[in-house]
Image: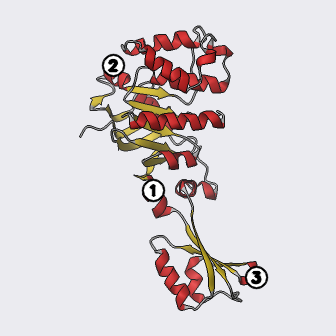
Amino acid sequence: MTKALEIENLSKSFAGVPAVKNVSFAIEKGEIFGLLGPNGAGKSTTINMIAGVCRVGDGKISAFGYDNQRDYRFTRRMLGVVHQEIVIDNFFTVDQALKLHAGYYGVKDDPDWRQLLIERLGLGPHLGKVMIKLSGGLKRRFMIAKALIHKPQLLILDEPTAGVDVELRHGLWDFVREINRQGTTILLTTHYLEEAEQMCDRIAIMNHGELIALEQTHELVRRLSNRQLRFWLETPLLELPVEFNDYRPQLQDDGHELLLCLPSGESAGALLKKVCALGLDVRDIETDQSGLEEVFLQLTGLREGAGGE
């Protein structure tokens, strides 16, 4: 089955310094796919090569089975890109720019679709304004409308909610889910890891130009996140049993609260059996699992202060 996007052994250097190193991944049609990484990881360079605004160093990029270098006219039409940097044309009003933009891709203007984008992105009161008169949030809304105006089959969102208000963020994600249900494939990069965890079917993580993780979102979080069990005890523990040494145990609330961390691969059931075997007087239990942010910090080494530039 043809992939929405297929990247094979992609590499790129600037002045001899590698920015992307032999990266390969594929995105299925209809998927919401997250490409994450710290600043300087190579995400935007990868997206710029996909979008055709940056030359491919080595490797191959295919969109819906078409090579993005050899069949660039077709692949550009299949893609809509919201770049991280705000790119606008100060000579046109919002209304003029949206009416013109579909034609750049050889697509006839669809007034009904254009009006839907204007309404959903809250651009109606601002149609007569030139770009320089728009706030940063409104410029971002315009860029999203512009990327969707020619009805692309793959929408690439590079930090689309950077610097925008909470209302737009929630409205945008609702709209993204809606067009995804209608068949549009989504490639998303964001530093809001909670958004990525909620939105993305699969996630790839880059660091220092390399792909260091690629997995179903829930599987990645389940496999690598820290899981904790918190026990409230009727009878306080005065000291920690040696049986808990492998669980990074902590006693709180004068021994009435016991916190244990599950090692990777061990089930909560196995730990509960050990607790029961020791005859602890358990009043209540709470489980907690860290999310994608913890996994991201663990994989990229940022928790240890490695940095990502």
Q: Amino acid at mark 1?
A: His
Q: How is the image coloured?
A: secondary structure
Occupied quadrant, residue 170: top right
Pointer 1 residue: 218
Q: CA distance from mark 1 to mark 3?
A: 36 Å
Q: Is residue 198 above or below residue 123?
A: below
Q: CA distance from mark 3 to mark 2?
A: 69 Å
Position of the N terminus, as image quadrant, is: top left
Look at discs 3 and 2 and give the one toward the viewer: 3
Q: Nearer the viewer, residue 8 or 103?
A: 103
Residue at horizontal 66%, vertical 25%?
136
Q: Judge left or right: residue 272 versus residue 215.
A: right
Q: Is residue 193 above or below residue 286?
A: above
Q: Amino acid at mark 2?
A: Arg
Indicate which disc residue 266 carries. none
Pointer 2 residue: 73
SS at circle 1? helix
Residue placed furthest toward the right: 254
Q: How many marks?
A: 3
Indicate which disc residue 254 carries. 3
Residue at horizontal 69%, vertical 88%?
235
Q: Nearer the viewer, residue 6 or 187?
A: 187
